[in-house]
Image (spheres, grey):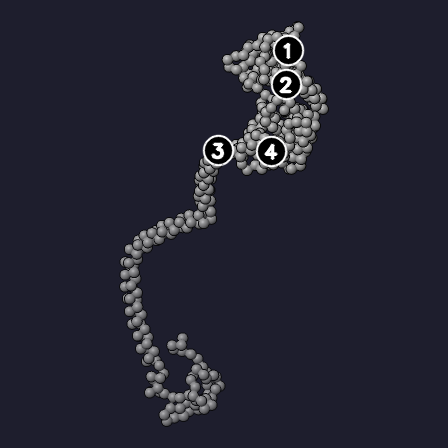
Amino acid sequence: MSNSLSVTSLNTKIKSLLEATFLHITVEGEVASATYHGSGHLYFSIKDDKSSIKCVMWRSSVARMKFQVKTGERIVVHGSVGVYTPRGEYQFIATHIEPYGKGALAVAFEQLKTKLDGLGYFDRESKKPLPKFPSKIALVTASTGAALQDMLKVAQKRWASVEIVVVDVLVQGDRASSMIARGVEYADSLDADIIIVGRGGGSTEDLWAFNEEIVATAIYRAKTPVVSAVGHEVDTLISDFVADLRAPTPSAAMEMILPDSDEILRILDERYTQMSSRIERIISYKSTEVAQLKSSIAKSSISAKLEVLHSSFSMLGEDYHRAMRYKLHQLQSKLDPLASSYTNIYLSSLERKRVEALSIEKNLELANPNRQSRYAWAEINRDGKKISLEQLDITDRFELLNEGVKITAEVVSKSRYGLSD
């Protein structure tokens, strides 16, 4: 069937339900059986007049007990319910055992726990997140306690740059709770990133100040995230429920809230190596892209196109000159005979024209009036001035003179003949 569960799934759900519901509870009853195992763990069961329940206390908790658990004794057991999933068995996991009649503090604890839970002091919604890299921490603890030195050592080792402010308070005794509450309020005004409220281990009476309502209220009202680090891992106090984070020990508190500088440096070194390698790959890839783009741009640029055209024109010019030289060579081979023939014709014609010119020159010389003046020479004057025949007009009166005769005449007619035609 689609809604059926596997055995493992059912046991897992039961485990989640029981462990979440029965967390930090107190049970009293008569010891039905008790076995101290060689491993140091204590296996026992308690009962009343109607039923019984199996219990276990782990070695670390057994080591803190001040008495031996014996069959038939009436005891008060603190702890929570756990389920062993493979066999579907549940048992009570004890963290603290008190003889019956010594449980007044336990009753007070449960009563206060119930009251504060009803007021919302334990609500997850009210828990404030802690910064991953705090720069300032306020420690509300005893300045003379070993817990302070343990926290300072861990802080120095993990994150030496963090600023530590110690708010010295009593952590045990009648006045301790009021001093712790005032210490939390003062620490909340220091502009710290985190407040740690804590002390080392001790008995229930020694740690009881952290179970007082005044301390719980101060932690709940603080605007700064608060870490409760009281006692050992097995100790559970009201401050643990109210605080934004519960640490099993003061040293553990520092380990939980401070980053490990060595680990951070290792991670940064790895990241640096990775980023350097990635950047080198990107630069190499981008350099190739840039080179390709430059090549593409160079090929498509005007200067590149002009260079191509210039190269083409140069090749065309060379082809043209070769073709012209070839044509001229061909024409030269044809022109040389023509030039020789033309020269001969030209020289022959020139010779004929020279002869004709000499003949004409001779005739002109013979016809020149200046050459004939020896036979019929006369000077022409008009108005006392020497002129030529060309200057005479019809009706002009003029004089003709030679070496011995002067004649006065008038132009009756005028015409041209001879060479002037």
The disc placed on residue 266 is 3
Disc 4 secondary structure class: loop
Q: Which of pointers 4 and 2 lies earlier in the amino acid sequence?
A: 2
What residue is drawn where x is 46% and y is 39%? 283
The disc placed on residue 143 is 4
Q: Are marks 1 and 3 in contact (CB under 8 Å)?
A: no
> Along the horizontal axis of the image, is 237 left or right of 269?
right
Instruction: Name the one closer to the observer, 66 or 398.
Output: 66
**Residue type at numbered disc 3:** Arg
Q: Tell me if residue 122 comes above or below residue 2 in the rendering.
A: below
What residue is drawn where x is 55% and y is 30%? 150
Q: Is residue 6 visible in the rendered structure shown here?
A: no
Which residue is disc 2 drawn over? Answer: 24
Disc 1 secondary structure class: strand
**Real-space CA distance between mark 4 and mark 1, rounded to the nearest whole angstrom:** 40 Å
Q: Quadrant of the N terminus?
A: top right
Q: Position of residue 161 (x, y in %)?
A: 55, 38
**Residue type at numbered disc 4:** Ser
Instruction: Name the one closer to the observer, 61 or 300.
Output: 61
Residue 194 in which image quadrant:
top right
Instruction: Report the mark closest to the observer, 1 or 3.
Output: 1
**Real-space CA distance between mark 4 and mark 2, rounded to the nearest whole angstrom:** 31 Å
What residue is drawn where x is 61% and y is 8%? 72
Which residue is disc 1 drawn over? Answer: 74
Q: Which of pointers 1 and 3 lies earlier in the amino acid sequence?
A: 1
Q: Position of residue 414 (x, y in %)?
A: 45, 81
What residue is drawn where x is 63% and y is 14%? 99
Q: Which of pointers 4 and 3 lies earlier in the amino acid sequence?
A: 4
How many marks overall? Answer: 4
Q: Tell me if residue 89 comes above or below residue 366 in the rendering.
A: above
